[in-house]
Image: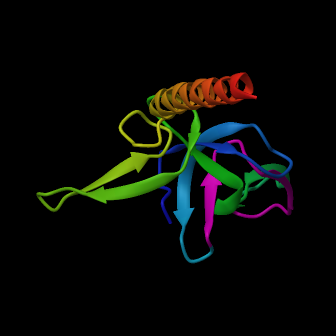
Amino acid sequence: MKLRKDDKVIVIAGRDKGKTGTVQAVLPQENKVVVENINIVKRHTKPSKKIPRGGILDVTKPIDVSKVMVLDPASGKPARVSYVIKADGSKERIYKVSANHDNHPAKAEATKSKKTEDKAKDKDKAGTKANSKAGKK
C-alpha cells in the first residue's frame, strides 16, 4: 500500500466523491484508510461508562484504498505514487504527475509539439511529392 499517515488524499468514488482530507490511519490488512471528514456514519450508542449520555454519534469509518488518490504536494493534483531506489540505496517517493517524473504534462506537451511539427513536415514533403506527380500528368 502506497498511502501513508498524514497524506492529503481526494476521494474519487462513492458518496464523498470530490472531497479531500488527510489520512488519519492506514489499515493494510483490510486495504483501507481512515480519512478525516470522509465516510462519516451515525452510530446510535447506549449510555455506558465511556459515554454516559449515549445518543447519536458521528463516527469516521475506513474507506477502501481504491476509492482515494494521493494529492501531489507540488501541484495539488491527484497522482499515482511510485518509488525509485537511488544510487545510495535510499528509497524516494515519486508522484507520477510531478515535474520530477518523466511523464510530467509539460514534458509530454513538449514532445507532442515536436511530433506535430514532424508530422507537418512530413505532410509538406508528401504535398510536394503529390504536386510534382500532378505536374507530370
Q: Picture quarter containing residue 100? A: top left
> Residue lying furthest front in this view?
137
Q: Is residue 108 visible?
A: yes
Q: Quadrant of residue 46?
A: bottom right
Residue 37: in magenta span: yes
Q: In the figure, is residue 78 to the left or right of 67? A: left
Magenta stretch encompasses residue 32: yes
User: How far across and down, in percent of the image, does residue 60 sit?
Assistant: 72, 52
Residue 88 is left or right of residue 26, and the answer is left
- Where does the magenta region start and end? 31-49
Residue under the point 73% across and 37% down: 19
Q: Position of residue 136 (x, y in %)?
A: 69, 27
Q: In terms of depth relative to the viewer, which is nearer, 84 or 52?
A: 84
Name the side, left or right, on which 125 lies relative to 5: right
Residue plotted at (58% across, 33% down): 77
User: Which quarter of the figure has residue 49?
Assistant: bottom right
Vertical order, 123 against 58 (above or below): above
